[in-house]
């Protein structure tokens, strides 16, 4: 997959193969720029690049390798926004409900001693949930895809 | 008749030999030897000689292409190595912990604060506080415009851990949005000093030092 970075003209899409940390850095920067072009405020665009960074680093930590893609959306009733999809070729979640909790990863609670170490703080997916308006995991034959959406205006609760 | 037949079989023989030579050279090329060439006799204008010349040109062109490809390969490997070194450098630079005064550490945080970065920074800072016997750690977050709430929580816990290690912890450069998040989450910053910027923090600490020594 060739990386496509929107530079001039109307917002297009972003698609990066994620095989290493350099790819995550490039993808999250492109996503921040795309978010700005779609109309998100600078702070919101930074939040979306945090989402990209969390999903991207999870691909590297747990998903072996994969891709990060993003494109504008315009849905009836919700308005304009942006989707982010993190596709990986790794294992499925063991316990998604637990993995979504802060302080936990897919295997269980993170040792508080390790919270000050290099394994992360178990808050990545929590951050993704807080910074987006919808979250879905699609298990695939050879991996999985996480798709999140954020709209320019927060959708009204049903 | 005899001589004619002899002549014909002789040329046939020569053609067969030439073909055999050509096949040998081409198989060498197949094994990667681009320096091999077919022998041409001076002044030989026969069609076979033209074919030989053509084949030699082709082998030469392949050789040049192969050299170019090897060069590109080496350049690419060099560039990849550079990228890897730069990545490591960025990681090192991303959490510079500077000793700006005796026992006073300063951590200027810039860029994106995601959960990976916050945990890396925490371990680096706590290690530095212990190793350097720091009396004060000033964490400047002017360069951070947004953090997820959990990351803010982790940050505050890190500041408390610094206090537990016996060092003052000062947070500077908090922007209104992050300040709102802290308040909204009901986080307790009572043991953590905050200032608007690094200069004020340093000024206050130095004043305190001078006062206590006088």
Image (spheres, rainbow, N blue to C red):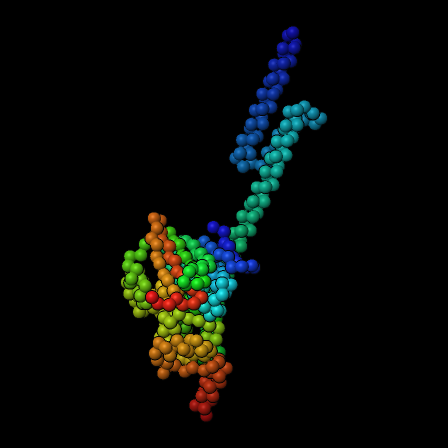
Whether residue B20 is situated above or below residue B166 in the rendered picture: above
Up the image or down, B198 lies above or below A23; here it is below
In this rendering, position of residue A25 left or right of residue A106? right
Q: Is residue B17 left or right of residue A81?
A: right
Quadrant assignment, res A104: bottom left
Image quarter of residue A67: bottom left
Residue A64 visible at all: no
In the image, residue B162 sits, relative to residue B25, either above or below, namely below
Please tell me which residue is depicted at 57% across the width and 41% down the height of the picture.
B66
- Residue visible at 31% across and 69% down in the picture: A113
Q: Please tell me whether residue A50 is drawn above or below residue B197 in the rendered image.
A: above
Residue B3 drawn at (x, y percent):
65, 9
Judge by depth and name the residue closer to the eye, B79 or A132. Answer: A132
x then y, percent, for residue A99: 31, 62
Name the image quarter holding the N terminus of chain B: top right
Residue occupying the far front of the picture = A77
Q: Residue furthest top?
A: B1
Front position in the image: B100 or A151: A151
> Residue at 45% of width from left, 78% of height from top?
B176
Q: Residue at x 36, y 83 (%)?
A: B190
Give the side of residue A48 with respect to residue B160, left or right.
Answer: right
Residue situated furthest right in the rendering: B43
Which quarter of the picture shows residue B177? bottom left
* Visible residue check, residue A1: yes
Residue that protrudes farthest toward the bottom in the picture: B214
Q: Position of residue B29 (x, y in %)?
A: 55, 34
Q: How far across and down, in percent of the image, does residue A20 sit?
A: 44, 56
- Viewer-proximal residue among B9 and A157: A157
């Amino acid at each position: 997959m060739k990386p496509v970075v929107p530079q001039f003209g109307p917002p297009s899409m972003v698609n990066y193969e994620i095989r290493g940390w350099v790819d995550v850095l490039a993808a999250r920067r492109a996503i921040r720029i795309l978010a700005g072009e779609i109309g998100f405020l600078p702070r919101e665009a930074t939040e979306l690049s945090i989402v990209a960074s969390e999903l991207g680093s999870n691909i590297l930590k747990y998903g072996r390798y994969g891709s990060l893609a993003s494109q504008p959306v315009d849905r009836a009733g919700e308005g304009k926004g942006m989707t982010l999809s993190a596709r990986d070729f790794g294992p499925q979640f063991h316990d998604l409900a637990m993995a979504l909790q802060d302080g936990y990863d897919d295997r269980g609670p993170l040792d508080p001693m390790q919270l000050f170490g290099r394994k992360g703080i178990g808050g990545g997916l929590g951050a993704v949930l807080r910074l987006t308006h919808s979250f879905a995991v699609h298990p695939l034959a050879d991996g999985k895809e996480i798709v999140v959406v954020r709209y320019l205006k927060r959708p009204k609760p049903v | 008749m005899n001589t004619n037949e002899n002549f014909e079989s002789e040329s046939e023989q020569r053609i067969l030999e030439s073909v055999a030579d050509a096949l040998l050279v081409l198989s060498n090329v197949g094994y990667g030897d681009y320096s091999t060439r077919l022998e041409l006799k001076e002044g030989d204008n026969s069609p076979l000689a033209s074919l030989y010349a053509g084949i030699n040109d082709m082998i030469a062109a392949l050789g040049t292409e192969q050299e170019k490809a090897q060069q590109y390969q080496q350049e690419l490997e060099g560039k990849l190595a550079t990228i890897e070194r730069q990545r490591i450098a960025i990681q090192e630079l991303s959490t510079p912990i500077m000793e700006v005064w005796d026992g006073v550490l300063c951590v200027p945080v810039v860029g994106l604060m995601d959960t990976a970065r916050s945990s890396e920074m925490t371990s680096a800072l706590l290690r530095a506080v212990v190793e350097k016997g720091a009396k004060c750690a000033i964490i400047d977050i002017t360069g951070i415009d947004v953090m997820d709430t959990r990351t803010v929580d982790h940050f505050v816990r890190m500041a408390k851990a610094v206090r537990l290690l016996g060092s003052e912890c000062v947070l500077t450069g908090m922007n209104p949005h992050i300040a709102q998040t802290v308040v909204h989450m009901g986080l307790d910053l009572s043991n953590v000093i905050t200032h608007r910027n690094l200069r004020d923090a340093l000024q206050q600490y130095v004043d305190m030092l001078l006062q206590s020594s006088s």
